[in-house]
Image (spheres, rainbow, N blue to C red):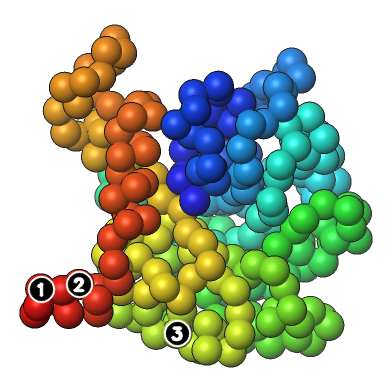
Amino acid sequence: MLGTHMANWLWDDDPRLDGVTLFISRNRLARRVSPFPAARRDWALDSGGFTELKDHGGWRTTPEEYAAEVRRYSKQLGRLLWAAPQDWMCEPWVISGGTIGGQHFAGTGLSVAEHQRRTVENFLELQRIAPDLPWIPVLQGWDLADYERCARMYADAGIDLAAAPVVGLGSVCRRQATEEIARIVDYFASRGLRLHGFGVKTDGLADYGDQLVSADSMAWSVGGRRNPRLSECTHRAKNCANCATYALRWHQRIVNAPPRWRQADLFAA
């Protein structure tokens, strides 16, 4: 999936975007008051939970309000593949607060186990409120033992994760320990879970992308902001942080790249 903050790409008539599945944050849709045009391509919805917990230390939107929002997006836009629940990320800085990488975190003051309990509880509540909408369960944690505990919470609630079309894997996008994440992915993929990796780094995709059914990333926008504007681009912006040409070129490069283990074989040849 191509993660993007450009919500208009959902309905833009640019034919280059056709066939590309987009990943959009609720934060980019919730501001719009007027009806949405019909989407021209498939997409999935991120709940915007990281920003919510980072800035406010908790969810300000009730499950009922969130479900109503998602129903509006699904009805007006259409082509919604799935929507993430109001999950609770488990990074230490999300829990403890402070300033990390120049970003201030309010901190929740809760435990990893409590974040997991609230994540599972929210998924169950959203299913109860709006069973017609395509909610996906999300595994949250920090180390493998945490994720195993979260999986048991779902099992205890009667949710068979192996039967779910997609299971989100949270709290991985801002982590540097790619090998640790690879072990977590391998553990659950080997048990038949069809995983979506939220914000997986490029290195992660090379290492374990073949064990995910999907992943999203905004790395293209960061690169577009830091690198010189593409010579063929005619937009007024000084960089390509919002540029479909840059995003699609990045996306194709990632999609076409062989896994790292295959790269080694190619270089050896």
Q: Which amino acid does label 1 sit on?
A: Phe
Crowding at dot 2, Cα within 10 Å, few <14 / some 14-19 / many 20+, comes out as few
Question: Are the residues at dot 1 and dot 2 in contact (C-beta closer than 8 Å)?
Answer: yes
Q: How crowded is mark 1: few (under 14 residues within 10 Å), some or many (20 or more)?
A: few
Q: In this view, does 100 lie above or below 242?
A: below
**Distance Cα–Cα, label 2 vs label 3:** 19 Å
Q: Which residue is drawn at 88% across and 53% down?
A: 132
Element carrying mark 1: helix
Which residue is under mark 2? 263
Residue under the point 48% across and 34% down: 17
Q: Residue placed farthest to the top in the image?
A: 236
Residue denoted by label 3: 186
Callout in the foreground (3, 1) = 1
Q: In this view, does 102 lie above or below 143?
A: above
Front-lying residue, 260 or 241? 260
Judge whether 243 appears above or below 219 on screen. above
Pick the residue in front: 124 or 96. 124
Kind of element beneath mark 3: helix
